[in-house]
Image (cartoon, grey):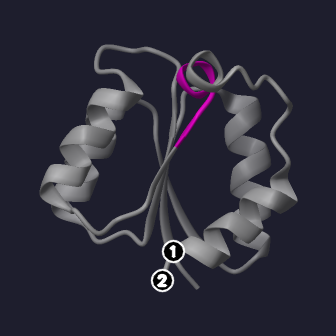
Amino acid sequence: MKNILLCSSNPLLIKNIYGVLRDAGHVVEIVEHPALAVKRVLSSKFDFVIVDSEPFGMSAHEAAQVIRSVSPGIPIMIMGGEWEKDHGDSTPLDLEELKRTIHNIAV
């Protein structure tokens, strides 16, 4: 069981990822904005952070930089636009692959 922070304001994405991760036995906390993700990492311990790249104030990339500076060992996954723009990948999210990735990365 891992403690996972999911940061997204997309209700469909939250519903899908939350369900898969909870069914896999993980504890999932949800916040809507990257700045709130940074705040939660400062006050709680998480094994893994997932940040949706939908821009609201602080970008997902900026939030990841701050989270890494205060919790350097925590794995962070950025999903969506920024990843697609940098890597040219717009394939749909494979929830089973996400589950395997978290299992393999988050210790």
Q: Nearer the viewer, residue 76 or 54?
A: 76
| Location of mark 2 (residue) | 107
- Mark number displayed over residue 106: 1
Magenta segment: does it hold 81?
Answer: yes
Helix, strand or loop at mark 1: loop
Query: Looking at the picture, does residue 80 appear above or below residue 99?
Result: above
Q: Residue at x 82, y 53 (%)?
A: 95
Q: Residue at x 65, y 22 (%)?
A: 84
State the separation of the CA atoms marked 2 and 1: 4 Å
The x, y position of residue 81, in whole percent, is 60, 19
Pointers 2 and 1 in contact (C-beta within 8 Å): yes
Query: Which amino acid type corresponds to the residue marked 2 in the rendered image?
Result: Val
Q: Residue at x 76, y 32 (%)?
A: 12
Q: Viewed as shown, does residue 46 lie left or right of 53?
A: left
The x, y position of residue 91, in whole percent, is 85, 29
Q: Viewed as shown, does residue 41 lie left or right of 92?
A: left
In magenta, the rendered stretch is 78-83
Within the image, what quadrant is residue 13 found in? top right
The x, y position of residue 74, in whole percent, is 34, 65
Q: Nearer the viewer, residue 63 or 29?
A: 63
Location of the N terminus by quadrant is bottom right
